[in-house]
Amino acid sequence: MSLRSEAKILYHVVFKRNRGRDHAGRMEDFYGGQAQGYDAFRSRMLKGREEMYGGIDAPPGATWVDLGGGTGANLEFLGPRLATLGKVVVVDISPSMLAVARQRIADRGWKNVQTLQADVTAGPPVAEPVDVVTFSYSLTMIPDWFTALETAWAMLKPGGWIGVVDFYVSRKHVSPGMKRHSWLARSFWPVWFATNNVFPSPDHVAYLHRRFEPVHFTESSATVPYLRFLRTPYFVFLGRRAA
Ligand SMILES: C[S@@+](CC[C@H](N)C(=O)[O-])C[C@H]1O[C@@H](n2cnc3c(N)ncnc32)[C@H](O)[C@@H]1O
């Protein structure tokens, strides 16, 4: 990543005031100036994506919808499996992120991948029932995340897969077997991320476990670029809609 590109990303993430009259406007204002360098910078921070995309056992010919799919870079994690899928739709509210995705699709010659500009809380972006729905670091950026998860549930065929990877904070009192974050972590990360309209929640994990049948769940932490003494918690959830 060039120094200029790195500086541009840092400006948007750290210094630029986010404007926009509504959620779509805020997202495009945030990503418009950094979509080109987004993947290189975020690969150092958005961990667990390979685990999530690699863990989904999609049947051949499956329809896979990536909600808040951004630049489509995560489809690279599917490797040769991508060609076995029937249709993949990268849905995102930001036209700038989707422009990068379209360039990638053209460069890679992916014939079964398409993009769709839509707000995932405005109803199912794809009319037919689908086999897989994924959210990679998008749930924390969707204020009405519960609507987004209900939309995912409604879109899925019975037995269909959901995969989510994202930042989070634990509840103060956790269920048995779950990690408990310190008071400092539970207080600090929501405040830190809110400046970029990212809202790590103690409720995403609980709601996913309630709404879907859990298949795989891990809790880890990732370092922050330039601030390697900080570790931000993230989770990976794979589940299925009850058959
Ligand atoms: C942190 S980025 C993650 C992008 C990509 N999934 C990744 O793993 O790199 C969050 C993405 O969610 C998108 N997004 C936020 N709210 C959305 C909504 N309501 N509907 C669709 N996309 C949304 C943003 O435009 C952005 O591209």
Image (cartoon, rainbow, N blue to C red):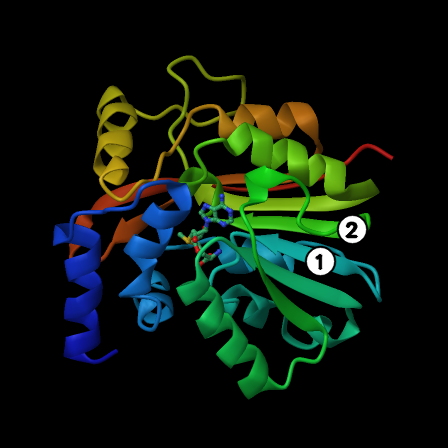
The residue lying toward the viewer, choosing from 230 and 66, is: 66
- For disc 1, the marked residue is 64
The image quarter in which residue 162 lies: top right
Asked if the residue at label 2 sits under 8 Å from ligand 1, the reply is no
Name the quarter where the C terminus is drawn. top right
Circle 1 crowding by C-alpha within 10 Å: few under 14, some 14–19, many from 20: many
Residue farthest top in this picture: 173
| In the image, residue 177 above or below residue 219 | above
Whole-percent x, y for residue 114 in the image: 64, 69
Which residue is labeled 2 in the image?
Answer: 130
- Mark 1: amino acid: Trp
- Residue at x-position 48% and y-position 24%: 203
Judging depth in this view, the residue of 62 and 227 nearest the camera is 62
Can residue 220 be spotted in the picture?
Answer: no
The residue at the point 79 percent across, 45 percent down is 160
Residue 12 shows up from this direction: yes
**Marks 1 and 2, how far apart at CA:** 6 Å
